Amino acid sequence: MRYPTLAPAASLEVNAGRSRLLSRIYRDIGLAAVAIELDLLEQDLGEEMEDAIERGARFIAPMQLQLAS
């Protein structure tokens, strides 16, 4: 038994194709994790790669929460 879709498939693909934010975030986090694990942070990896690693490292770094005093 087939169930009707809520939206036509073409419109779903168009919406998913435009936004690549999550894909970039996952890539940056993965690059940062590998660079940290392999101790590549001191190496010259190129400006674009270093920027991606820096963005990804922000997601995996422990957050410092300010406590009210």
Image (cartoon, rainbow, N blue to C red):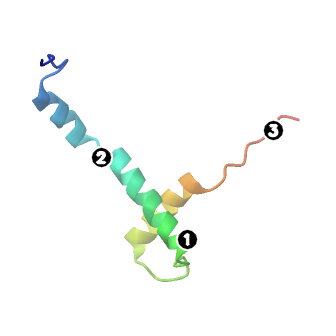
The residue wearing badge 3 is 67
Placement of 57 over or under 7, stated as above or below: below
Residue type highlighted by circle 2: Arg
Q: Quadrant of the C terminus?
A: top right
For the residues labelled 2 and 3, the Cα–Cα distance comes to 35 Å
The residue wearing badge 2 is 20
For the residues labelled 2 and 1, the Cα–Cα distance comes to 24 Å
Q: State the residue lying farthest toward the right.
A: 69
Residue type highlighted by circle 3: Leu
Q: Residues within 10 Å of mark 1 (few under 14, many from 20)?
A: some
The residue wearing badge 1 is 36
For the residues labelled 3 and 1, the Cα–Cα distance comes to 29 Å
Which numbered disc, 3 or 1, marks the residue that appears first in the sequence?
Answer: 1
For the point 30% across and 46% down, the residue is 20
**Are the residues at dot 2 and dot 1 in contact (C-beta closer than 8 Å)?**
no
Direction from residue 35 to residue 68 in the image, left or right: right
Which numbered disc, 2 or 3, marks the residue that appears first in the sequence?
Answer: 2
Direction from residue 26 to residue 64 in the image, left or right: right
For the point 21% across and 42% down, the residue is 17
Q: Quadrant of the N terminus?
A: top left
Placement of 60 over or under 22, stated as above or below: below
SS type, badge 1: helix
Q: State the residue lying farthest toward the front.
A: 1
Residue 66 percent coordinates (x, y):
77, 41
Which picture quadrant has residue 45? bottom left
SS type, badge 2: loop
Direction from residue 66 to residue 35 in the image, left or right: left
Residue 42 percent coordinates (x, y):
55, 81
SS type, badge 3: loop
For the point 67% across and 49% down, the residue is 63
